[in-house]
């Protein structure tokens, strides 16, 4: 569906409990809710529908437009399947473009919404190109440092599409994803994604530091436990079971034995 289209239309609606679908990306969804399953049964490959996030993920059956975030995504069906022996369907969708929900026109047996496509814009096209290039450079630096899938994004992308793909790869909260989805100005969206990328990088570095400290602490404790076990083994070999007041005598006997340096440190404590 072209983003140049401005006419609203009624399309099947699939509410998401959490997360969003960005244009230009694909998601695979397990479909278990009764109304969602009824919707999926009507879909065929290539069909169109609207995807929107719920305001309350605990809500089983949203029935009002107020129950949904009104900025959503037009989606194209890539695959519908039902694994053998399972009750849930599996739905693969591709995001096509941004959309604004205007009304829920049907809730049974599945949801149908009246929706209007949203056109993206750029308040400063040249600036968007510069921001896009800077974001790409930042991704290349992350990729060289083990940035995972972020370094595998296609090289030739429009700035707005680059922002969407990066946002979809960051593991953002639903709130942050909705902020990116709702930003129609390409330049502002790039700025927002750049800030979120920096925030994600900082959090990642903090997690790595904490993990390293935890591992270091665990490693030290395990090493000392091993050395103490080695010490007890040596004691058993000597036929000694030291009682209170015999530590000095035991140390004197160990002084005549050639011990590994790390074991010696434990003995000398």
Image (cartoon, rainbow, N blue to C red):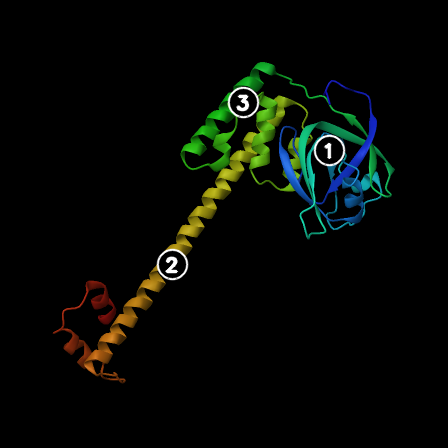
Q: Residue at x 51, y 35 (%)?
A: 198
Nearer to us of marks 2 and 1 is: 1
Mark 2, residue position? 217
Give the spatial CA distance, label 2 vs label 1: 46 Å
Q: Nearer the viewer, residue 199 or 105?
A: 105
Mark 3, residue position? 132
Instruction: Looking at the image, tell me whether mark 3 or mark 1 is earlier in sequence order.
Output: 1
In the drawing, does residue 99 fall left or right of residue 209? Answer: right
Instruction: Looking at the image, tell me whether mark 2 or mark 1 is earlier in sequence order.
Output: 1
Q: From what the image shows, is residue 123 above or below residue 35?
A: above
Report helix, strand or loop for mark 1.
strand
Q: How many marks?
A: 3
Report helix, strand or loop for mark 3.
helix
Q: Residue at x 25, y 68 (%)?
A: 266
x then y, percent, for residue 95: 67, 30
Give the spatial CA distance, label 3 vs label 2: 42 Å
How many other residues sit within 10 Å of disc 1, few (<14), some (14-19) or many (≥20)? many
Report helix, strand or loop for mark 2.
helix
């Amino acid at each position: 569906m072209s983003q140049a289209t401005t006419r609203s239309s009624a399309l099947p609606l699939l509410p998401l409990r959490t997360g969003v679908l960005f244009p230009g990306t694909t998601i695979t969804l397990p479909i278990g809710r009764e109304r969602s399953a009824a919707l999926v049964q009507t879909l065929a490959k290539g069909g169109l529908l609207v995807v929107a996030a719920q305001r309350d993920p605990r809500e089983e059956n949203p029935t009002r437009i107020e129950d949904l975030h009104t900025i959503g995504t037009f989606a194209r069906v890539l695959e519908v399947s039902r694994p053998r022996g399972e009750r849930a369907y599996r739905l693969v969708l591709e995001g096509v473009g941004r959309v604004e929900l205007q009304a829920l026109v049907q809730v049974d047996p599945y949801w149908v919404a009246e929706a209007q496509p949203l056109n993206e814009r750029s308040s400063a096209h040249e600036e968007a190109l510069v921001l896009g290039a800077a974001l790409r450079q930042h991704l290349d630096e992350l990729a060289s440092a083990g940035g995972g899938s972020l370094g595998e994004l296609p090289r030739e992308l429009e700035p707005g599409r680059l922002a969407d793909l990066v946002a979809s790869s960051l593991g953002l909260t639903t709130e942050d994803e909705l902020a990116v989805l709702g930003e129609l100005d390409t330049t502002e969206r790039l700025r927002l994604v750049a800030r979120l990328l920096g925030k994600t990088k900082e959090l990642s570095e903090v997690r790595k530091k904490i993990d390293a400290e935890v591992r270091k602490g665990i490693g030290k404790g395990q090493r000392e436990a091993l050395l103490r076990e080695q010490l007890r083994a040596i004691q058993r070999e000597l036929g000694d079971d030291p009682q209170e007041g015999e530590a000095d005598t035991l140390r004197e006997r160990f002084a005549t034995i050639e011990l590994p340096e790390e074991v010696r440190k434990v003995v000398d404590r």
